[in-house]
Image: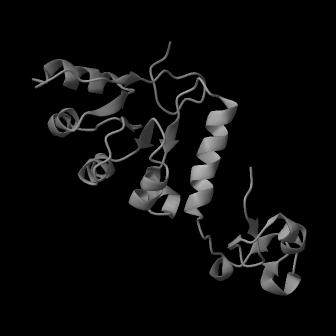
Amino acid sequence: DHRGTVDHGGRVGGNAESLSAAAQVDRGRFRDADRLAVDEACARIDLAALKHNLAVARAHAPRSRVLAVIKAEAYGHGLLRTARALSGADGFALLDLADGLRLRQAGLRQPIVLLEGFFSDDEIPAITAHRLTPVVHHRAQVQMLAAARLSRKLDVLLKLNTGMNRLGFHP
């Protein structure tokens, strides 16, 4: 579901009627026919559209749980403002422990998954205290967890390498 359009400068807005006009190539605004000039690219995020799109996803998969992936400062659109707009999600997925802590400090209580897990045993107490869920993808992480003195139960997700050979245990 697309609730906006992209104009020649890459800005989101308007309505569906203007999409075809906005999508036409204006060669004077491009350095070459295939690439938008970097200094002209701009994205404006419609937070109401994010909420709407989450509702559409839920309508199409009503018995599914939704984990909003908002890593890398919500792909440059602002971590906290995007998380608040998607507060109806069942949880959030991030890369950095610091970002997980920011969401907790902002009052968000949904599950938070740390997609890369942790890299040092000194991160485990904060992960446990703030009820974050690390993805465990390496034997060293298992060893760190086994040696940790946890103050409470810690949920983890286990990542299996299913063929992309990036992260995960081989099945």
* Residue nearest the observer in this picture, 151 or 60: 60
Would you identify the image quadrant in which residue 33 lies? bottom right
28 relative to 107 in the view: left or right: right
Residue extending furthest bottom? 28
- In the rendering, at what x and y percent does residue 24 appear? 89, 73
Would you identify the image quadrant in which residue 16 lies? bottom right
Which residue is at a point 52% across and 33% down the rendered structure image? 166
The number of callouts visible is: 0
Colour scheme: one colour
Which residue is at a point 62% across and 50% down the rendered structure image? 52
Vertical placement of 141 versus 116: above or below? above
Residue extending furthest top? 171
Vertical placement of 104 versus 168: above or below? below
Which residue is at a point 63% across and 82% down the rendered structure image? 39
- In the rendering, at what x and y percent does residue 170 appear? 49, 17
* Residue nearest the observer in this picture, 50 or 59: 59
* Residue nearest the observer in this picture, 34 or 150: 150
Would you identify the image quadrant in which residue 32 lies? bottom right
* Residue nearest the observer in this picture, 158 or 142: 158
- In the rendering, at what x and y percent does residue 58 appear? 61, 35
Vertical placement of 141 versus 8: above or below? above
- In the rendering, at what x and y percent does residue 23 appear? 85, 69
104 relative to 26 in the view: left or right: left
Vertical placement of 75 versus 62: above or below? below
Which residue is at a point 20% across and 32% down the rendered structure image? 128
